[in-house]
Image (cartoon, rainbow, N blue to C red):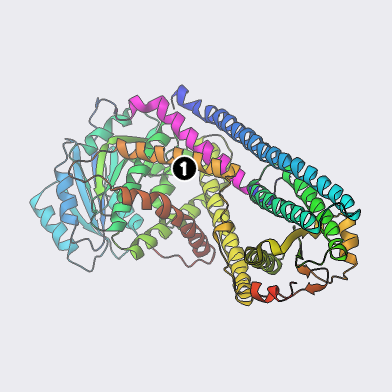
Amino acid sequence: MLDFITIVYLVYSFIALYFLFLFIMIYLKNKDKFFTVPKLTKEYSLSIVVPCYNEEESIGGTIEALLNSDYRNLRKIIVVDDCSTDNSYEIIKKYATKYSRVIAVQTPRNSGKASGAKNYGARFVTTELIGFVDADSYPEKHAIRNMIGFFDDPKIAAVTSTVLAKNRYNFIEKLQAIEYKIITFSRKLLGFVDAIYVTPGPLAIYRKKLFDKVGCFDETNMTEDIEITWNFVSHGYKIAMSTLSRVYTVAPDKFKMWYKQRIRWNVGGIQTINKYKSNFMKAGMLGVFILPFFVMSWVIGVVGILFLAYRIIRQAIIYYFSTFYASQAQTAILTLRDINLTPTVLFFFGMALLVLGTAFTLVALSYTKEKGFKKQGIFSFFVYSFVYLLAYPIILVNSAFKYITKTHKW
Amino acid sequence: MLESSKHAFWEALIITVAVFALGIFIGIAYENANANKINSFYSSSEISLIDSLALNNVFQSNAVTCDAFINSSIDFADRIYQEAYTLEQYESAGKLTDSLRLAHTRYDLLRTLLWADMMQIPDKCKTNLSTVVYLYQYDTQDLNQKAEQSVWSQTLFDLKQQQGNHIILIPIAVDSNLSSLNSLTNSFNITKYPVVIIDNNYVLYNITSANNLATYLK
């Protein structure tokens, strides 16, 4: 008879193997189409909204990157200052004076969230497409142009891009650089099965009439870019990803900022799950895949960390008692004799997952070659695979706690 | 979505089920191979035990010297101690089958027989050989008891290392539900486990050092 712990491990192994094989299958079927984008048949009119709050160091670079875009029908770059307390608005106004395409606007009062500034900026947009670029993000010259062709398909509501980390000086930035590449690769794979669940803020373009139809960004949600994507998918629309459209964004350079950002992402994720829970297992990719995938990730992460905590606490109690008895017996608590090198079936499953997971990560990294950046080091890769990812369940638990206790902040 | 991509969901499921089933199958085969190895050890040990019992019978008729009988018993005890250690390693690695649980009980029975056999020695031979019987609970969920048993086990191993052939160490799990073992333990009025019985004379409940244990030996 299998014990409970073995059953839990086997269930986890099965689920992990399934998703790994799913991604491998999708990859094998579509690897030739990874970098293909539809030919540009029509130059839809486009406006880009850039929400900005205290970004004096980066906003100029973002505007210049947009001005440098080779998409000819980019009509307006609407930079929305959300009542910054630094010099951001002055910089924006200088660009607006110099370039007719740049429009400087300011919210009547600080909205306290990117979605507020984005929705405010969207009021000034009259073009067929509306794009959003974060004020600390820098799209490449061809990025926007490579996204437009996808809109020839009337079912496409939004097109997302390849988001990469711009800064890679310290260790946390290097780890995020690896993470962003893997997220990009995974998102593209999900795109092949119409299961993209987010259109990240650094660069995303939406069909304006559909953007208005779904009610713009939900300002009560902490991750408006996830929420609006689910909103589109729940209405039967599709999301595409242009792998060739790269945008470099500033990743948090301090652990505290990184942690705060991840908490925000995850609280937003729970808010979105809660909002769309009625779609669970209903027709469409949202109900049959995206929502169950999210919920399962949450359950696995939270149950996993609770389970791990139980095991650690249990072992700590045994060590505590053992120390007490060992001092009485004047003997060692741990000896070489206690090391059991007989492998278990769970060890073999773990090794299979490790090998497949590492192979997947390496393929993902090899797909996003970047100019001007060093390749990630083996040490960063190791820490990312075995330390960084393990921090996620802690973030999940903390996010759930903050969501339940309503202590989350923007 | 492309038609071919749509199939990825069930194709991945089939591959996962196949890989998973293969993994379970290999796991069961691997655990059975371990069980077979232990069973093979056990069969040899069983022969040795019967040989030892036969020797004991011959010994009663004074045809065998004390040294020959004692050396045979020590060899046998050391052998099943090592085999039981291997068994425990395999058991902790066994996740899918219960095949080794039965082997554990059989080893407990062997050791109970050895203990009973050793009880007859003092009457016949004036020897400095001590019998150290360690009774513990195999299936305990009590973390304190688990820790205590683990330290007892290590301490007795230290004692065996110190004393070599001067002691016969017989660890037996008391929850094997063996009537012979129950009868033996009842005769000592044991109130709790783990417990160490030295030379069927000293019943020690409190953990102590190997050096201190040595003072109870002959």
Q: Residue A37 at what x, y percent from top left?
A: 29, 29
Q: Place residue A392 in its image quadrant.
A: bottom left
Please indicate, yes or no, whether residue A112 appears anywhere in the rendered image: no
Q: Main secondary structure of the magenta part?
A: helix
Asked whether, in this view, residue B32 is left or right of residue B55, the answer is left
Q: Nearer the viewer, residue A308 or B117?
A: B117
Which structural element holds mark 1? helix
Q: Residue at x 24, y 27 (%)?
A: A40
Neighbours of disc 1 within 10 Å: few (<14), some (14-19), many (20+): some
A277 and A380: which is toward the camera: A380
Q: Work out which quarter of the rendered image holds the N terminus of chain A and state it.
A: top right
The part of the chain drawn in magenta is: A7-36
Residue carrying label 1: A354
Q: Please tell me which residue lies in front, B135 or A86.
A: B135
Image location (x, y in percent) of residue B197? 79, 69
- Residue A8: x and y in percent read 62, 48
Q: Does the magenta portion include A26? A: yes
Picture quadrant where residue A127 is located: top left
Examine the rendering and report whether any part of residue A243 can be seen. yes
Q: Chain of mark 1?
A: A
Image position of A166 with respect to B208: above or below: above
